[in-house]
Amino acid sequence: MIKNKTWNRKKIVTIFFVCFAIFLVLGGRLVYLMIFQSDYYTKEAQELHERERSIKAARGRILDANGTVIADNKTVCTVSVIHNQIKDPDRIVEVLSKELELSEDYVRKRVEKYSSIERIKSNVEKEKGDAIRAYNLEGVKVDEDYKRYYPYGSLASKVLGFTGGDNQGIIGLEVKYEEYLKGQEGTILTITDARGVEIDEAGEERVEPIAGNDLYISLDMNIQSYATQLAKQVMETKQAERVSVLVMNPQNGEMMAMVDVPEFDLNNPYELPEGTEAEGLTEEQKQELLNQMWRNGCINDTYEPGSTFKIVTAAAGLEAGVVTTEDQFNCPGFIMVEDRRIRCHKTTGHGAENFVQATMNSCNQVFVKSKKINYPRIALSLANSSPLASSNLWRSCSTVSFFFSSPRISRIILPSISIIKRLP
């Protein structure tokens, strides 16, 4: 009997210490979680109950050399629904399909989709967004957003480029300087209960967005507009498929105008040119047509300078003194070089002319060969008489050759661009 009592006592003591040890471990774990890990789990709980919506940042503007705004922002709205907060789905489907001009099936599919937040439509006009907000539909969120707006329409379209649905740069300067223009998004934080319904008493917390930087470029829209008009006139007169015009500041190489017509409407960049047969085209064929429409021939195509290089030759000859403005020449309309007959563009010839007139007439005969000036003779004269002038000629030749033939020119478009201020 005594043996049994002793054995039971030992058993009770053993169970007691085992339970004590278990509670000690659990208590220690509880202390660790509640004191040492409190910050971590507080943050986790807060994230679990917080509903986050992004606030788009205003994209930086693009301004020309005179400070004229050529790419700006327009306030629009993004309409979304939160499934757990919807109380009258039929009413929401009816209103949104009517106001946003969408099919009921499309809207219903998104309203009934079980997700934290479902976007119905973005880039909605502000007036339309305000009208939807006025319905006070539970579960429907109308957030302000920004859409890129180009006040000059198609002017300098292939230089500026455009943005996509999320306001990100697609082509041109918009994508080249995306990291400077895009800004930093903000957020709207609201507290929800376990079912995901917002708690009105908790209010909302906002992290304001940071606007993007303004971009100042060397283009002058007055010169760009005039150059575009001239390019269109030439295109119509010569029945050309495309006409390109570049205007540069000779002092520093800044681009003052860059035209490549036909251009496209920056505010409707996915609209094919008028007269294009879009019916029956596959998505791939349509995309190819769009790519061709957006392509900037000024920086993507190679071009032989031809007669424009005569400017370099003439300047080198005058600088070296191997020709003067008063030197006289005679152009019969052609010249024989070895066994080749090279014609002047005026086949009947320019007749008697001095060097200034020959330059004005772009006379091939004078610039190819005469007793006073030819390409080899200029180079030799420069090399013998003026090392500085010779180096200037070769530097000019290298620059022109690079400009007209190197694909790397796409990397130096508008070299004077600088980021100088942030939107207020």
Image: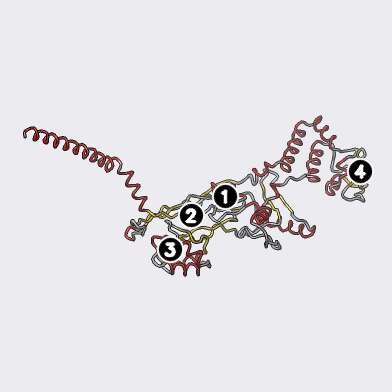
Q: Nearer the viewer, residue 52 or 264?
A: 52
Per the image, the residue denoted by label 4 is 341
Which callout, 4 or 2, points at the residue further toward the start of the chain? 2
Q: Answer few, some or many: residues within 10 Å of disc 2's Cα (few below 14, many 20 plus, some between 14 and 19).
A: many
Per the image, the residue denoted by label 2 is 56
Q: CA distance from mark 4 to mark 2?
A: 66 Å
Q: CA distance from mark 1 to mark 4?
A: 53 Å
Mark number displayed over residue 386:
none
Q: Answer few, some or many: residues within 10 Å of disc 1's Cα (few below 14, many 20 plus, some between 14 and 19).
A: many
Amino acid type, callout 1: Leu
Badge 4 marks a residue whose secondary structure is strand
Of marks 1 and 4, the one in the foreground: 4
Amino acid type, callout 4: Arg
Q: Answer few, some or many: residues within 10 Å of disc 3's Cα (few below 14, many 20 plus, some between 14 and 19).
A: many
Per the image, the residue denoted by label 3 is 140
Residue at figure coordinates x 83%, y 49% from the top left: 360
Q: CA distance from mark 3 to mark 2?
A: 18 Å
Which callout, 3 or 4, points at the residue further toward the start of the chain? 3
Q: CA distance from mark 1 to mark 2?
A: 19 Å
Per the image, the residue denoted by label 1 is 215
1 and 3 marks in contact (CB < 8 Å)? no
Residue 36's place in the image compared with 239, above or below, is: above
